[in-house]
Amino acid sequence: MTQEFNVIDCHIHLNRSEQEGWNARAIEDRWDRGGSLPQLERYMREASVSAGWIINAWPTEAMRQALKSRAPKSLDEEAEEVLEGRIREVMRGRCGRKNAWLCDVAGKAPEKYAAFLGGVDPYFGTDWIVDQLVQGAAAGARGVKIISTWGQYYPSDPALQAAFEKIEELGLVILAHAGGMDSHASEVHARDYALPVQWRPVLERHPNLKIVMAHLGFLQPLSGYGSETHQQRIELARDFPNVSYDISCGYEEGFDETLIGMIREIGADRVVWASDWHAHRAVLSLQGLKRSLLTEDEKRAILSENAHRILPF
Ligand SMILES: [Zn+2]
């Protein structure tokens, strides 16, 4: 008989409609089609998850390229600039509305949901980003989601310096995609945007940031146990006490001894449980973790206590 644990899910993609979720992650739409609020409520009941971080992971590059593909192809330089400006305005409007909606959902159930803003991406411009952070925090946002592979930029981009200062000042938590390339865009310029090591300059400049890097073991065995990427995670955890890792991805079909080794190398006090719902669910992994050879203290830390320390509900 496994003991009942309190479970906080630190990585949930939530969408205003099933269509939005389908558009955002069509190629991975395997578990809960669309990822709408009623579907999330059902998943949380099924998996006995008491609270979650609901995120706006904004697909900047894929959406920009999609909008641009509908425009005429042979524009002169000036017309091209006007078009890019219009696309940026459309995207700012869309991303801002999604942020406001997430804050509204979390505001109605603050003991259950923490809203994580999207749009911390150099593409949107420093002033717009800082404005979203201030407005979002005033509306109850608790964090930001950074997915530099979807925006194709490096976290150390100078355009984000002011944003990180504001994030630090407002006490927002960062959930950052970390690991391999995962773009959903047709044109990809580099593949290393989200490697853990890319965060080192940011962490050095902003010692008070609270960062959770997503996907411990993302796409095992490519970036899991024993890989160069995993070594980077261990080194970051050693050098920066404000870095933790979420456990999502790579364990959808179970929880094994290898993962216990990975967790203990990082430190069980630095790992939080997460599913990356709706494209992923990780219910088997959750049951496996509860029944695993981790100690009861380690299980409690990973399933809720560490998350609660980083972001108290
Ligand atoms: Zn995710």
Image (spheres, rainbow, N blue to C red):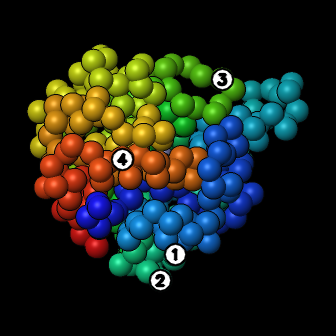
Q: Is residue 266 left or right of residue 254?
A: left
Say which quarter of the image contains residue 311.
bottom left
| Mark earlier in primary sequence (1, 3) | 1
Q: Secondary structure at mark 1?
A: helix
Q: Give residue 108's mark.
A: 2
Alpha carbon distance from label 1 to label 3: 34 Å
The answer to which of 16 and 303 lies nearer the viewer is 303
Q: Are marks 1 and 2 in contact (CB under 8 Å)?
A: yes
The answer to which of 290 and 251 lies nearer the viewer is 290
Nearer the observer: mark 1 or 3; the answer is 1
Residue type (three-letter) at the residue carrying disc 1: Val
Residue 43 in view in this figure? yes
Residue 243 in view in this figure? no
Category of crowding for the residue at label 2, using alpha-carbon neighbours closer than 10 angstroms: few (below 14), some (14–19), many (at least 20)? few
Where's residue 194, x and y in %? 40, 30
The answer to which of 202 and 37 lies nearer the viewer is 37
Q: Are marks 3 and 4 in contact (CB under 8 Å)?
A: no
Residue 41, relative to residue 172: is it above or below? below
Residue type (three-letter) at the residue carrying disc 4: Gly
Where's residue 29, x and y in %? 66, 45
Nearer the observer: mark 1 or 4; the answer is 4
Residue farthest along the front direction in this orientation: 1
Q: Residue at x 51, y 19 (%)?
A: 190
